[in-house]
Image: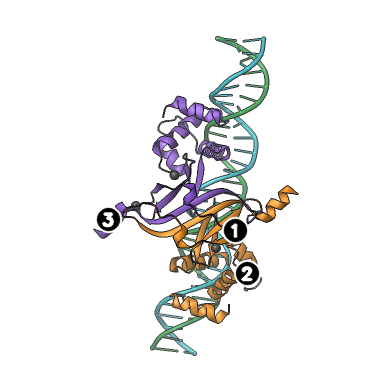
Chain colours: A purple, B orange, C green, D cyan
Amino acid sequence: MEQQQISAYLLKSGIRPLQKRVKIMSYLVSKRNHPTVDMIYSDLIHEINGLSKTTIYNVLNLFVQSGVTLALNIEGNEVRYDADTSTHGHFKCKICSGVIDFRIRKEELPNPMLEGFRIDEHHYYLKGVCSFCVNKIEA
Amino acid sequence: MEQQQISAYLLKSGIRPLQKRVKIMSYLVSKRNHPTVDMIYSDLIHEINGLSKTTIYNVLNLFVQSGVTLALNIEGNEVRYDADTSTHGHFKCKICSGVIDFRIRKEELPNPMLEGFRIDEHHYYLKGVCSFCVNKIEA
DNA sequence: AATGTAAATTGAAATGATTACAAAAATAAG
DNA sequence: CTTATTTTTGTAATCATTTCAATTTACATT
Ligand SMILES: [Mn+2]
Ligand SMILES: [Mn+2]
Ligand SMILES: [Zn+2]
Ligand SMILES: [Zn+2]
């Protein structure tokens, strides 16, 4: 996606499309790799002169608050970020640590009997070993 | 549940049923409140003489490894522990921070097309506002 | 283009959760 | 009882994230 489109998208979402914000969103959208803050930092430090890790925290927190990014808590200490805010599920591989998407329609997710509750977010996480690592183990 | 039963259960699961382990499992089983390490610590410190937080980490890690306890990563940094290892879902209230169970049969959970993957764990988390807090807000 | 103001970014220090580790205590075996 | 093994403890180390004051940037107005 073009930086122009990213800017327009951020603006529409009530976020001033400053350079670093556009670069970070651009990274999330193009990579689609559910990165941690550290992954984003070590990738963008080369590209953006004098980037600080604090800025990444700031920007991501803003993105999450504004609803343009999801914070995924699949495992323990690590938070992963996802610019795809549509309904979908996540699989995390125990071996290679990769997180991959799978399509799920909202209607497929069970709707539990929670009388009087207001439900804002659905998260469906699977954990196991991805096909690539399954092959490695068997070999 | 009796401490006797807890001991037998741990033993059957390959865990030596030492005093503190039994007490901690007993707490999890009876309270069913999905506590954090700190909640367990502040509750049991009165009951168990000279209990260390490190021991709680040790014991819980052992429980999780042995499969008698689930570690839930519903939100950010906090890990919550659950002695109910059967298939069920969790709802977390943004207001009161409580985590409650809801029944879900394994067959109700969607089975995504993940060719060649080995799936070990299913986690279904909902977030929102519980009925009690919804009432508080309206009032 | 220069100026002023508000917002964003930075780096260092603070915080909070978890782990590492070595010493002390408890448990099991002989 | 003695000894070997396992567990627990307390402290220090580590790691992720937040706080905060100082600096820089963006941008509207002269
Ligand atoms: Mn995703
Ligand atoms: Mn539960
Ligand atoms: Zn893998
Ligand atoms: Zn509530």
On screen, residue A9 above or below A122 = above
Residue tagged 3: A136
Q: Which residue is mark 2?
A: B44
Q: CA distance from mark 2 to mark 3?
A: 44 Å
- Chain name for mark 2: B
**Ligand 2 shown in quarter:** bottom right
Q: Chain of mark 1?
A: B
| Separation of residues labelled 3 and 1 (CA atoms) | 38 Å
Q: Is residue A67 left or right of residue A102?
A: right
| CB of mark 1 near ligand 2 (< 8 Å) | yes
The reply to whether discs 1 and 2 touch (Cβ–Cβ < 8 Å) is: no
Q: Amino acid at mark 2?
A: Leu
**First in sequence: mark 1 vs mark 2:** 2
| Secondary structure category for the residue under label 1 | strand
- Gap in angstroms between the C-alphas marked 1 and 2: 20 Å
In the image, residue B125 lies at what x, y percent?
53, 54
Q: Is mark 3 within 8 Å of ligand 3?
A: yes
Task: Please give the name of the residue rendered at 51% of the width and 40% of the height, measured from the top-left corner.
Answer: A69
